[in-house]
Amino acid sequence: MIFHIRLFFIIAVLFALPIVTHAQTPQPKAVETKGLDVPATGKAKSPNVADKNSQREQQAGGESTVMTTQQGIPVGNHQNSLKLGTEGPTLLEDFQLREKIFHFDHERIPERVVHARGSGAHGYYENYKSLADITKADIFQRAGEKTPAFVRFSTVAGSAGSPDLARDVRGFAVKLYTQQGNWDIVGNNIPVFFIQDAIKFPDLIHAAKPEPDSGFPQAQTAHDNFWDFVSLTPESMHMIMWAMSDRTIPRSLRFMEGFGVHTFRLVNTEGKSTFVKFHWKPKQGLQSVTWSEAVKINGADPDYHRRDLWTSIKAGNYPEWELGLQLFDEKFAEKFGFDILDATKLIPEELVPIRIVGRLVLNRTVDNFFAETEQVAFCTQNIVPGVDFTNDPLLQGRNFSYLDTQLKRLGSPNFTNIPINAPRCPIHNFQQDGHMAITNPKGRVNYEPNSWGGGPSESPAKGFQSHPAHEEGSKQRTRSEKFADHYSQARQFFISQTPVEQEHISSALVFELSKVQRVDIRASIVSHLMNIDGSLAKTVAAGLRLLEMPSPAKALKATRMDIEPSPALSIIKNGPKNFAGRTVGILITDGVDVQKLNQLVDAIKVEKASVKLIAPQVGGVKGNDGKLITADEKIGGGPSVLYDAVALLPSEDGAVLIAADPAARDFIADALAHRKFIAYGEFAKELLEKVNPNSTNRPQLILLDQSNSAQIFIAKCRSLRNWTD
Ligand code: HDE
């Protein structure tokens, strides 16, 4: 009898590695052995510096776990390479040095060609109730069942080290470790895409990425090549409206929606197929920053989103999204004004309501960024029985690309052996060997069918069966007539926004096109905008100071003017219900009124929001009770753009002192300009007036002079900004 042991290997890799010893496995590079001053085992000691000639004689204390090479050989001296005499050449014989430098030289793997900059977290999907009538997917069968999940958020255009607040689409890729294999929903925070056919993807990405001769700009679409491509690709206009909206500068990864984008199928046990679009709705509500904030955040904290996700989860403030399904059938698909297979179109929620079926909770940060966030490999073709593809030409192309790119990036077809990619259900097959194979089967048989007995074989009943959609036609390189309307939904998006959001779209277009050097490209974009909304086109043309208004771009299909606005498309109309998960930055100085500070902090905590104290020095301030209060940031290191609302609680002397500090004045001026709510104590009044005369009359300012002022401030903060003033 031959047993396939792959499952046991996977379990061992997933659960046992952290507790087995070095001698038993090649894998565990125990953290505790890596740094002399990292007390991971509680045993490590600071280096013992010998009295004489410390450069040469520095040695670890005697109590730490003994460091070894990758081969397990105990290391005797980790400070010096092996030399001939004290000042002679280094010896080739030094296997310790060679192994260490060799490994270091090979630490990098190719970054993702797109979505290189990412942040990941673990969690689970919890199914609310059985969806057996719609799909046989195991994950949806039982109410209350939790399925482990890993999510990687990303930007698209920038390199792995680019700043988080680049204006860009965000990837929202979810890996669900279901009992019937891994299901990946590799989506974005925008429900549509730039192009209709996969064959245009390399062009789109080449145009968006840094220009090939100069190598800049990094993580920016604000350059000639991108807008040149877009101006010649009218199908991208709907996505352009989204990309120029505040959707591409989210305040937090926790405060954005996710979308599967394509139409997929759900298939039930009777083989009945229902079309579906996947939505992730953040329970925290939607929120974005302004462009002026984004530009400053990128300098003040380029890891703003990554840090926010990490610290929220570490603080037990777990972000949640509800999974929503838009379900529809062939009949709807036929009468819908656009093609459901066209990824540049969405189906308005008002036409097909979203059915909420479960929730995704992220409750664990990664242990190791490289092992998990970097090595995770999503594939659109990872689907499970009960889910199926449609003929969306973009999806069909993606199904080829993801597996292909993983081989390049991870270097071996065995990337599914890496714990983050390994399914959590049994795996049985005869695939074998290849680079880094760690789960090869034991025994003689490695083929099917065989007459030795044992080994896996197919199961028509339990196995994946493609939905037998009937297809026919001649081979041709064309697009369906039904893909030809490029402007109507772009218009619908624009007219669904509040006036503030519309103003942000036109400003973003003016900003981006102002970085484009060729005037004809700027004009060409305006010609497309004329097919979307006349006033938008005029505002952008004026913002660019175009000398002549171009004629509208030639449209394959005229824009439909009858489409109603869809309120679901606005961020401001879908903000949070409360201020939970947000942060208030409180500026304090020596002599701060401790009672007032405590009242404010209490009110913020009751709302489940958090506090950052900003002071002239990070060491902190002495309150009016003489006690030291430590700060989180120095004023210049904690600009107000990092916070959702701010408070100013200087003492009388402190206010005079910080009035002379440009960083403190910027802190206040920015908070005012970004329409944040500002709570202030009596001594901040003069400071505020100095920075901006008459500012204390603005409704966004709340004087903390009553016992309930802090509560009034927090109640105002729930609307995030004072857009009306
Ligand atoms: Fe991707 N995309 N994509 N994409 N995509 C990749 O796969 C590709 C598209 C998306 O966090 C790559 O592992 C093609 C749409 C996300 O690891 C690559 C086309 C949507 C991520 C690839 C598209 C996405 C990727 C690069 C046009 C939203 C990051 C590295 C047909 C629904 C996943 C990798 C992660 C990553 C190809 C279009 C989302 C090259 C050919 C539409 C979230 O395979």
Image: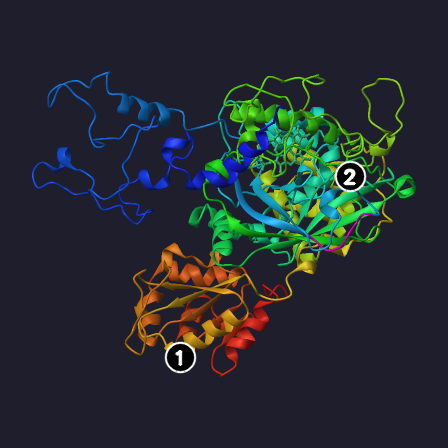
The residue beneath circle 2 is: 386
User: Circle 1: is it few (<14), some (14-19), or many (20+) Cα within 10 Å?
Assistant: few
* Residue projecting furthest to the front: 1
Give the label, 1 or 2, closer to the camera.
2
Left or right of residue 600, residue 286 in this image: right
Q: Secondary structure at mark 1?
A: helix
Residue 207 vertical position relative to residue 183 in the rendered view, above or below: above
> From this viewpoint, is residue 78 visible?
yes
Q: Residue 260, percent across and down? A: 71, 41
Ligand 1: image quarter: top right
Q: Secondary structure at mark 2?
A: loop
Q: Residue 30, percent across and down? A: 37, 38
Residue 308 vertical position relative to residue 330 in the rendered view, above or below: below
Disc 1/disc 2 C-alpha distance (Å): 59 Å
- Count numbered badges in the picture: 2
Left or right of residue 647, residue 177 in this image: right
- Give the numbered dot on residue 595: 1
Say what amino acid the circle numbered 1 marks. Answer: Gln
Left or right of residue 391, residue 108 in this image: left
> From this viewpoint, is residue 519 visible?
no
Q: Residue 604, percent across and down? A: 50, 70
Q: Residue 304, percent across and down? A: 48, 49
Residue 168 vertical position relative to residue 518 in the rendered view, above or below: below
Q: Nearer the viewer, residue 399 or 145?
A: 145
Q: Earlier in the sequence, mark 1 or mark 2?
A: 2
Q: Nearer the viewer, residue 41 or 309?
A: 41
Q: Main secondary structure of the magenta part?
A: loop
> Which quarter of the figure is the C terminus placed in?
bottom right
Q: Nearer the viewer, residue 262 or 302?
A: 262
Seen at 37% across and 26% down, the residue is 103
- Please provide the residue range marked out in magenta: 127-132
Seen at 8% across and 41% down, the residue is 51
